[in-house]
Image (spheres, rainbow, N blue to C red):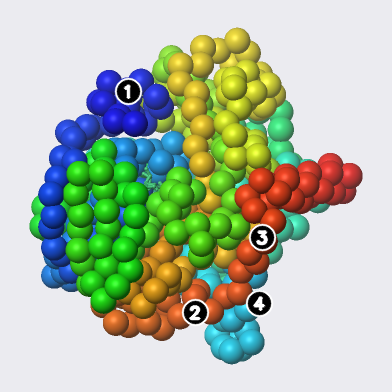
Amino acid sequence: MIITDAVMKAETYYAATARDTAPYPALQGDIDVDIVIIGGGLTGVNSALELTERGYRVALVEAERIGWGATGRNGGQVTGSLSGDEALTKHLRKTQGAAAEDFVWNMRWRGHEIIRDRVARYSIECDLRHGHLHTAYKPSHMAELRATHEEAGRRGMGDEVDLLDTAAVHERLETPLYHGGLLNRRNMHLHSLDLCRGEARAAAGQGAQIFETSPVTEIIHGKRPVVVTAKGRVTADTVLLAGNAYHRLERGKLAGKLFPASLANLTTAPLPEAEARTINPQNLAVYDTRFVLDYYRMTADNRLMFGGGANYSGKASPDIAAELRPALERTFPRLRGVEIEFAWSGQAGIVPNRIPQLGRLSPNVFYAQGYSGHGIATTHIVAEIMAEAIAGTMDRFDIFASVPHLRNPLGERAGHMMLALGMWYYRMREKLS
Ligand SMILES: Cc1cc2nc3c(=O)[nH]c(=O)nc-3n(C[C@H](O)[C@H](O)[C@H](O)COP(=O)(O)OP(=O)(O)OC[C@H]3O[C@@H](n4cnc5c(N)ncnc54)[C@H](O)[C@@H]3O)c2cc1C
């Protein structure tokens, strides 16, 4: 499908308010580069930027528009929640001992540094704000937040986090919910599509060739692999496949490794300034402690952005606004009946052990995918690791590539059913605890 500017604008809050909507051309004819990247979300765009900054000739080929996938549909929350951190620590302890904890802790915050640096260096306007609140949905959930608070203190981050009791949370959010929370001033929120398109513009400024509306239909493996689209071909030394939950390439090796889950999100119409300051006076991004959680924040034009739930069948809900409204109104009773202006869904790549999947399909064809519903910070870390690997420094890539991942032999349909069953089990366990 060719996505015109008008279609892109109509679909999500992000597309409707994006600052840079100027299109990139479609790929026409044959070109030759050092590295070709498939997929123009945060993973692909940041890998392109990292590699052009290192002096490589890079082409990036996107099926729709830059940031069209999960990147232009997410909650915009930049948190230190590296998905699969516990499983990764456990895996690494076998070879690295106590250093495993340090590796994972540093990884959790590296994405924040990269984002802040990019935004400053390339003057990317993306409504970046600091401040995040992780709220305890049940009193028993405070134990987890207390442990994170203690760890942050031990690791020299104590001045950036505060443990809040119920009253202190209610000073910051006009809601009857929650039993305390963890306030984190290092975490951020931002306009994810503007960040991605700003980073793409920076990569193009450094010489990357960017193509939109050019779905890749095939990767021809070989000494110099070739990426094929309807009207062109890119020959390169190295390919990076960064299509995440949206692509259908390389089924032989990748089918059954990643499960697309459909996540829902919406924004209200802009709220009057006084109302916005009443429900969330410090403009914090928020998510709660449940396994399938609600997440929300204010946008720069005073809308409430509110997301939650997940559909593990991989199919989008037919009426996202109706599905999310009860949770929104339970959270902020004063917004009962509020107008919902944009409602949309996006595909996130879920991995059973939640550890991002980095690997190779052949010696010079790499892939990176699967951030299990997180990813704004993680994609920036992963892009750095992929660029390092393509440039020949394999240490961090090898750590991820060595992680064993389950591959569902029963095909994707059965995989969705198993995932849905697993999620149902966790939700029930949470309800009963
Ligand atoms: C509703 C929702 C809310 C979320 N909220 C948050 C949040 O608040 N915080 C957070 O950290 N993370 C969040 N995430 C997760 C985060 O958005 C993703 O992890 C991240 O954007 C993944 O980026 P990506 O580049 O790997 O994939 P994507 O952004 O999905 O990009 C993949 C791209 O590949 C392109 N593509 C696919 N096939 C082809 C092909 N054959 N040829 C060419 N191009 C192709 C697609 O068109 C797409 O643009 C959320 C996700 C969703 C869906």
User: Is residue 340 in view from this perspective?
Assistant: yes
Residue at 46 percent across and 39 percent down: it is: 74
Residue corresponding to mark 2: 399
392 or 80: nearer the eye? 392
Q: In this view, does 389 lie above or below 83?
A: below
User: Which secondary structure lies at badge 3?
Assistant: loop
Residue at 36 percent across and 78 percent down: it is: 363
User: Which secondary structure lies at badge 2?
Assistant: helix
User: Does the residue at mark 4 contact the one at mark 3 (Cβ under 8 Å)?
Assistant: no
Q: Nearer the viewer, mark 3 or mark 2?
A: 3
First in residue order: circle 3 vs circle 2: 2
Disc 2 beta carbon < 8 A from ligand 1?
no
Q: Which residue is most to the right?
A: 432
Disc 3 beta carbon < 8 A from ligand 1?
no
Q: Is residue 77 left or right of residue 336?
A: left
Question: Residue 274: x and y, percent?
Answer: 46, 18
Q: Which quarter of the rendering shows the N terminus?
A: top left
The label on residue 7 is 1
Q: Distance between the residues labelled 2 and 4?
A: 12 Å
Kind of residue indicated by mark 4: Lys
Q: Which of marks 4 and 3 is in front?
A: 3
First in residue order: circle 4 vs circle 1: 1
User: Does the residue at mark 2 contact the one at mark 4 (Cβ under 8 Å)?
Assistant: no
